[in-house]
Amino acid sequence: MMAVGRLLRRVPSSLHGDPRVGEAFERLKFLAHQDELDDGEALPLQSGGLDPRVIPARPGAARRRIDLRQRGDGIVADLPDPNKDSPGSLLVSVQTINGVMVVGEDDPVRPEEDRDAFWKTSIPPSWAEDWGLDDFGAWVTFRVKSVIQRMRWIPPGSFRMGSPEGEAERFEDEGPQHAVTLSRGFWLFDTACSQALWRVVMGKNSSRFQNDERCPAENVPWNDVQKFLKRINRLLPGLSLDLPTEAQWEYACRAGTAAPFSFGETITSDQVNYDGSRSYRDGPKGRFRQRTVPVGSLPPNPWGLHEMHGNVWEWCADGWRDYIGEAVTDPRGPETDDAGRVLRDGSWIGDARYVRAAIRLRSPPDGRLVGIGFRCVSSPASRDGGAEPAAPAWPRLAERRGAQGTAGAAVLKMESGGRCPLPMAPAVRIVTDQEEVRLERLTRPSWADAVGRDRFGLWADFAVPPLRGGDPVVQRLRWIAPGRFLMGSPEDEAERSNNEGPQHEVTLSRGFWLFDTACSQALWHAVMGENPSRFRDDGRCPVEQVNWTDVQGFLKRINRHLSGLSLELPTEAQWEYACRAGAVSPFSFGETVTPDQVNYDGNHPYRDGPRGRYRRRTAPVGSLPPNPWGLHEMHGNVWEWCAGGWRDYTIGAVIDPHEAEVAGAGCILRGGSWIDVARSVRAAVRSRYHSDGRSFDIGFRCASGSV
């Protein structure tokens, strides 16, 4: 081997970079330096062309899982062991047979290489036909039959709503001007809804000016728009269109400007469709078209939105709100049946003062006029709707792909204690003979009050101030890296149920955040203002007696409060993957459990395990030992609701399984509870219950794909 080493030192560097021979040289180098590799040292690769799959495994070697941990500025390989405290912070777990890993820098994904990287989740929503970036920002289109509609991404932000007292020709109801913060971004039609789109959805056209279907749909009352929204959302699941709130509408209309119009201090008929014979202040007189014009035919505002001034008044979602001088976040007017609905924008029939950005009117929801239309909004904050474009400040933490090799790398034999440098690069690629993982560095998400690393891996905290005052409630989430695992129980697992099989391989291709505990009563009370639990003497205990539908209300409220977090229930596959934390035994703690580890009926142990304490109630969240990934009470304490409907297991491998909820089919529960025997708190145990079912042993924890 010494001769091989001398030979490699004499090889010109240009040959190492030659794809025809570079890998052969690297393979020779690997063989020449077996002694150093066996001692746990990493070997630099000059060409970076080594594919771990070409290195033979030892005879009889089986596939195994290796934990990769960050320690200082290096990566340390570690054999998983739930009974020891491993040094360093968990980065990701990978699978291997030959034990060879290549680590190197990776280039950021370019849009032309990975078009789906446009999306924050890298998964295009099912309703999206096309998407991209232009001078105005992110856009996406959807299609209903032959009609295509474009939407623009409106990022979250703050603005001054209403008009200042010195604005010419203003109305009193436009003030006092006040600061408004919109905590969530949203998609907005770049034009008013056209007659063509209205017709393909509703099957008719009730507009007055029907000679050109490119013109906006008008003569439509607010109530009819609700029917349109219901129909189009049924046609395009996940799109979840709605009307914009009044605050969203004015924010988008102003597009960062503070003048009376997004075009400046005045306007012309070449910019806006209004009665040009009645100009604003000393602006020029112009054309009065006396009808609507085709949507998108006039110049856009700075955010790419057409006809936000004039053409047709546009309905908003909320009812009339009297302004006050105080700053507000995500304001929404009353929505009672008798509340007048807000109209914004002005129309073709009004003079220039009526098409200013601050102008407001209201009308009964059954009001119908030839100057009234609408445009729609889609918010990614809704549980099933929308999708957010990728934000550069929130890169993906990990992404799992098929093994392909990497460049600018080092090779390591992944025996326990093996160490190699962690490249100081925005993205790192780790390749084994079985798979490839791509890591990207993370800046603090906007929703997080604190982030950090410990021996379990990456964590993030957020705080929620209670509705009725008091100290904020802090909740910690753990980052769960993507990976593969065997879901369900093997046929020989003691006391198993048939619905736990057949055991099958599941790949979760995306990482996610997960509450490190079940939702506490304190957090529920801070968000919802009440506590339905039976054991309410300690706010640290998990909230229980909440049904699946109640949890959806909690998610909606907390997501409105925390911009970008987008909490939801974990899928059943995410739940079991996180519960097992790399273990293949019945429990993440091993072959059995004790009441010191899990809250269950200790009078009924698992197999030949020891008897123990029966608490007869819930225990405070986080009071029992965590699993290897830092998650508390994944076994016992309370059953936990999951997202999606029941899935009958099959033998074949699956990727990101998630069954849609089916009415009457029941919702999934995992984890077991304080009232159950030990067999019912195993990692593979599954149950289901109707969505309105409540019990003092049912709670939940939340997940989020947002980074």
Image: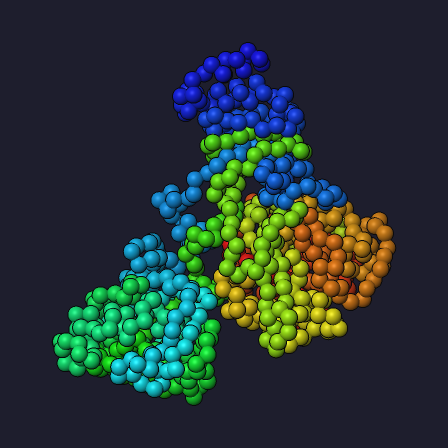
Camera-side residue of 146 and 509: 509
Left or right, 626 with reference to 614: left
Camera-side residue of 303 and 414: 303
Residue 682: horizontal and vertical position, in percent?
A: 72, 53
Specify the quadrant of the image occupied by residue 600.
bottom right
Residue at 52 percent across and 41 percent down: it is: 437
Taking the view exactly as shown, the residue that stands out farthest to the top is: 3
Left or right, 623 with reference to 386: right
Residue at 50 percent across and 29 percent down: it is: 51
Left or right, 82 with reference to 275: right
Residue at 74 percent across and 70 percent down: it is: 538
Residue 677 vertical placement versus 347 (above, below): above
Camera-side residue of 521 and 492: 521
Residue 123 in view: no
Residue 510 vertical placement versus 342 (above, below): above
Residue at 61 percent across and 21 percent down: it is: 34
Specify the quadrant of the image occupied by residue 621.
bottom right
Specify the quadrant of the image occupied by residue 347.
bottom left
Left or right, 209 with reference to 341: left
